[in-house]
């Protein structure tokens, strides 16, 4: 439970954590026991902090995806090189057999 003080009548009341978080996120109205509407106004710092955290999260996810793709390309290049070596070896064997 989170303690709230009504912006109108200053009565202290409690709301569940889940509702508190939801209302902080969506900025919707909730009411004190006396029926006064209350809202959370997000401060600029809070808003920017939240956006920055989201951006950092996205960046981390893109970075890890990029690292994965880079690793995958490396693997494919190595496997391509190995296959080329096999093809060359088979070609050489065939040329020897046919005496060319
Ligand atoms: Zn009130």
Image (cartoon, helix red, strand yellow):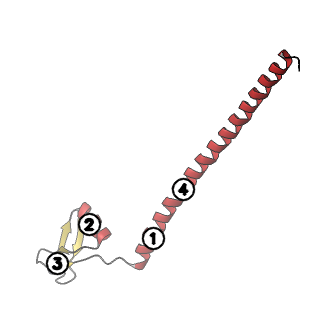
Crowding at mark 1 (Cα within 10 Å: few <14, some 14-19, many 20+): few
Q: Place residue 7 in its image quadrant.
A: bottom left
Crowding at mark 4 (Cα within 10 Å: few <14, some 14-19, many 20+): few
Q: What residue does disc 3 label? A: 11
Q: Seen from this angle, which residue lies furthest left? A: 34
Distance from Cα at disc 3 to Cα at disc 4: 47 Å
Q: What residue does disc 1 label? A: 49
Which type of secondary structure does the marked residue at label 2 adopt?
Answer: helix
Lower position in the chain sequence, tag 1 or tag 4 = 1
**Residue 31 against residue 98 in the figure, above or below:** below
Distance from Cα at disc 4 to Cα at disc 2: 31 Å
Which type of secondary structure does the marked residue at label 1 adopt?
Answer: helix
Distance from Cα at disc 1 to Cα at disc 4: 20 Å
Lower position in the chain sequence, tag 2 or tag 1 = 2
Q: Seen from this angle, which residue lies furthest bottom? A: 8
**Residue 33 against residue 21 in the figure, above or below:** below
Write the residue at 79% across / 25% down. Answer: 91
Q: Place residue 11 in its image quadrant.
A: bottom left
Q: Is residue 42 left or right of residue 97?
A: left
Lower position in the chain sequence, tag 3 or tag 4 = 3
Lower position in the chain sequence, tag 1 or tag 3 = 3
**Residue 4 against residue 79 in the figure, above or below:** below
Disc 1 versus disc 4: nearer the observer: 4
**Ligand 1 sits in quadrant:** bottom left
Q: What residue does disc 2 label? A: 20
User: Residue 48's spot in the image, x, y percent?
Assistant: 45, 74
Which type of secondary structure does the marked residue at label 4 adopt?
Answer: helix
Res 62 label: 4
């Amino acid at each position: 439970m989170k303690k709230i003080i009504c912006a109108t009548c200053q009565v202290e009341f409690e709301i569940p954590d889940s509702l508190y978080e939801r209302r902080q996120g969506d900025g919707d109205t909730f009411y004190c026991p006396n029926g006064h509407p209350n809202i959370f106004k997000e401060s600029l710092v809070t808003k920017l902090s939240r956006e920055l955290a989201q951006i950092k999260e996205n960046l981390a996810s893109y970075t890890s995806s990029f690292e994965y793709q880079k690793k995958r390309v490396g693997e494919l290049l190595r496997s391509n090189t190995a296959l080329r070596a096999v093809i060359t070896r088979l070609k050489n064997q065939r040329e020897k057999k046919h005496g060319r």
